[in-house]
Image (cartoon, grey):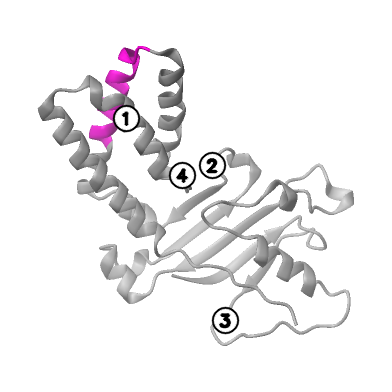
Amino acid sequence: MRVDFIWVENFKSFKEKQKLELLSNVTAIIGKNESGKSNLIDLLGDISLLNGFSENTYAKTPLDTIELDLDVVVECSFNEDEINMLNLTNKDKKVKFSLSKTYEPYKVKFSDGIIKYFEADSFQDNFYYLMEIINSKKSEISLQADRRKVENRLDHIANATEYMIPKYKEHFKIIKNNILKLLSTEQKEDYIKSEQFVIKYIEKFYNTLPHFWIGYT
């Protein structure tokens, strides 16, 4: 996956929405003093399509617009190998990542072609089987603290088809440790099989994410 465009609004000197096109042959940013070069590099260095922005980054808004939130959209595209691996078509190769505090606690929302990936019957069947089992059994968890823990983790996992979930494997593990003991032997086998499928499915998409490596000279 490569980054094609970045839209940024309300970050340091970028008050109005600005569009940055990242061409594959660009290796440096050149401009006059006070044109925003350092601010742009600062933004790129803070972007994480998995974890979103830190609170420190969200504080970097222009003083006269401090009541407004930083809003960033990163548009990417899958390469041919990734399109084939994810069983998508060329018309679905675009994916947008929206980074905004309005999505908390999820940080990053994705849209466009990647939605087709999560609409596949194989994923839907396994994912919603897990959701059904967890929702039907969570009330049987004896300790209230464990029950609340499962409910909290479930809130994150249930949104995995729209938002980036950084600790999804940890969420699944904690849920499984509490749910399996409530299932029959046959149910346990089915649960583990579906859970492994869903984790690998999400991981396949996450492994395509681009990384931002920024250097100053």
Q: Which range of residues does the magenta coloring cover? A: 128-142
> Answer yes or no: do the residues labelled 1 and 3 have beta carbons within 8 Å?
no
The residue to which callout 3 is attached is 23
Residue 122 makes an appearance in the image: yes
Q: Is residue 116 above or below residue 141?
A: below
Nearer the observer: mark 1 or 2; the answer is 1
The residue to which callout 1 is attached is 177
Q: Residue 72 bears which disc, if any?
A: none
Q: Residue flagged by tag 2: what amino acid is it? A: Tyr
Nearer the observer: mark 1 or 3; the answer is 1
> Answer yes or no: do the residues labelled 3 and 2 have beta carbons within 8 Å?
no
Q: Residue flagged by tag 4: what amino acid is it? A: Lys
On the image, the x and y values in percent for residue 87 come to 25, 63
On the image, the x and y values in percent for residue 116 come to 32, 54
**Residue visible at 47% across and 48% down in the picture:** 164
Q: Residue 106 bears which disc, if any?
A: 2
Residue nearest the viewer, comparing 17 with 199: 199
**Residue visible at 25% across and 50% down in the picture:** 120
Dot placed on the residue nearer the N-terminal end, 3 or 2: 3
> What main secondary structure does the magenta stretch of the protein show?
helix
Dot placed on the residue nearer the N-terminal end, 1 or 4: 4
Query: Where on the picture, by quarter, is residue 103?
Result: top right
The residue to which callout 4 is attached is 167
Q: CA distance from mark 4 to mark 2?
A: 11 Å
Q: Secondary structure at mark 3?
A: loop
Q: Secondary structure at mark 2?
A: loop
